Amino acid sequence: MFGVELSFIWAGIIAFAVLVYVILDGFDLGVGILFPLARTEQDRDVMMNSVAPIWDGNETWLVLGGGGLFAVFPLAYAVVMPALYVPIILMLLALIFRGVAFEYRWRTKRWKRLWDFAFFGGSLVAGFSQGMALGGLVQGIEVVNRAYAGGWWDWLSPFSLLTGLAVATGYALLGATWLVMKLEGAIHDRMRRVAQPLGLATLVFLGLVSIFTPLQDEVYFERWFTGGSLAFVVVVPLLVLLCTAGLWKGLRGGGDRLPFFSALGFFVLGFIGIGISFYPMIVPPSLTIVEAAAPDSSLAFALVGTVILIPIILAYTAYAYWVFRGKIDPSEGYH
């Protein structure tokens, strides 16, 4: 029983790390996706400066989630990686190009447009690949004798393309609302206007993914439309409507912070919906959290360090956001 409790504790920790990554890195990927909409060099500079001090710290949570999966759910890691190898590699390569663009863009004039494109392309490919990987996981991974039994391209489907577009669009919405919160002047007003169609598109994609997810496996359908989870079918849409009202109120002059936190609400609610669909599986449709967990001794050993590490990460992340709070001064640069 103790081992079962530890495995579920670890599943919660990894889910928390992934959610924090999506929330924090989502908006700075969104800023990159919106980079071509900047009309002047100064606009591009302040857009990049709005995330430059914090972007690399945001990706700490991706390392924590992936490393935690490898350490405490090795069977799940061994199944998921070959199943989603292509989108994961694309994501990592895109993040590398995007990270290099942060540094090189400020060091060159001749090749600045190249690194502008690398920042945009890396952000777009990373977001789209994350969405496709999510879709590939949700639609199910074929497991035989505790090993991946599918092909290289099983993840690629209309559903995974839909989730890829949904995540990239949602990230763009987060980026636009972040820029509304952090910038002033013409670029602020432009991003406020851009956020409105992005908000509508995000809602459409959220609705489509919510409709098609229960159709991917009968387990999902039963989870949502029978038993105690039936209440969430009513509660979640109501909360989505509440976030939508907050987003539109903020974008129409109700404050610069409200749109950003309302957009974050869409992601949190979507993540909760995925959790309801998956539980107690970690690799749907057949591999459960308990089956994929490492031995109890490994779970306990890793938990000790993680309990110490996570508060430290949360503390320095909160401190970084506190130090760089408020509107961006165009006269101050990353370089």
Image: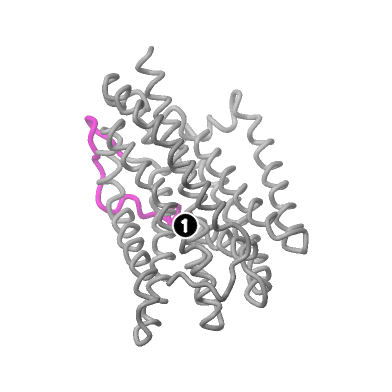
* Quadrant occupied by the N terminus: top left
Residue 6 appears at what percent x and percent y? 38, 21
Measured from the top left, where is residue 68 in percent x and y?
Answer: 33, 37
- Residue under the image location 59 percent in, 70 percent down: 329
User: What is the count of numbered marks?
Assistant: 1
Between 165 and 57, the residue placed more toward the observer is 57
Q: Which residue is mark 1?
A: 54
Q: Position of residue 272 (x, y in %)?
A: 55, 38
Note whether 38 is above or below 285 in the view shown: below
Report the front residue among 7 and 161.
Answer: 7
> Residue 133 in the image: x percent, y percent?
38, 50
Find out whether residue 157 is within the magenta segment: yes
**With respect to residue 237, does 49 lie above or below?**
below
Is 48 on the left or on the right of 89, as rendered? right
Q: Quadrant of residue 75?
A: top left
Query: What secondary structure is found at the residue carrying circle 1?
Result: loop
Q: Amino acid at mark 1?
A: Ile
Question: Which span of residues is magenta-colored?
Answer: 142-164
- For label 1, count other residues whose C-alpha is less than 10 Å away and answer few (under 14), some (14-19) or many (20+): some
Q: At x 74% / y 52%, what residue is drawn?
A: 245
Vertical order, 165 against 192 (above or below): above
Q: Residue at x 35, y 17 (%)?
A: 3
Residue 194 belongs to magenta span: no
Q: Is residue 223 left or right of residue 240?
A: left
Left or right position of 209 against 288? right
Q: Is 130 displayed left or right of 194 in the figure?
A: left
Q: Which color scheme does this rendered protein use?
A: one colour
Quarter of the rendering containing residue 304 = top left
Pick out the residue farthest to the top: 1
